[in-house]
Image (cartoon, rainbow, N blue to C red):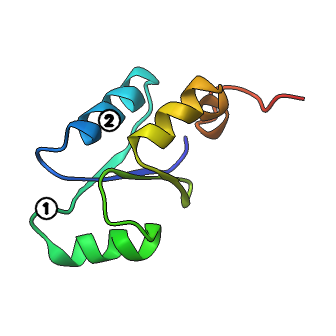
Amino acid sequence: MPDIIVYSTTYCPYCVRAKQLLERKDVEYQEVMVDHDPSLMQEMMERSQRRTVPQIFINEQSIGGYDDLAHLDAKGELDVLLGLADAPG
């Protein structure tokens, strides 16, 4: 199983969508809530170089936000990252 971390906040609709997409893939993820802990927000910003949520990491690789995750899914690349499919070629 890949190591998946989703930095999110309580009321972020894009966070909800990202988590729903991952749940549809039937993979486990660790959610890090950053809205009540400035140190976790700082950690997220340092790791991702971004200030917005969600920020998603798969096996330490920064994926970006929900739109980035959905784009990878649409191209079939998310399943490869998640270990659900073999890499093409």
31, above or below 20, in the image: below
Q: Residues within 10 Å of mark 1 (few under 14, many from 20)?
A: some
Q: Secondary structure at mark 1?
A: loop
| Viewer-nearest residue: 28 or 58 | 58
Q: Nearer the viewer, residue 4 or 35?
A: 35
Decide: few, some or many residues near mark 2? Use Cα within 10 Å; few <14, some 14-19, many ≥20: many
Instruction: Please state the horizontal and vertical placement of residue 68, each as a whole percent of the image.
Output: 50, 42
Q: Outermost residue toward the right?
A: 89
Give the percent coordinates (x, y) of residue 47: 45, 71
Q: Which mark is residue 19?
A: 2
Q: Locate residue 58 relative to residue 88 in the image: left or right.
A: left
Residue under the point 63% across and 40% down: 81
Amino acid on which disc 1 is placed: Asp
Give whichever of 40, 45 is nearer the camera.
45
Q: Which residue lies at the image location 38% right of the left edge and 43% below the top edge?
A: 29
In which quadrant of the rendered image does the N terminus lie? top right
Q: Which amino acid, by three-letter code, is at mark 2?
A: Lys
| Residue shown at the point (44%, 71%) measured from the top left | 49
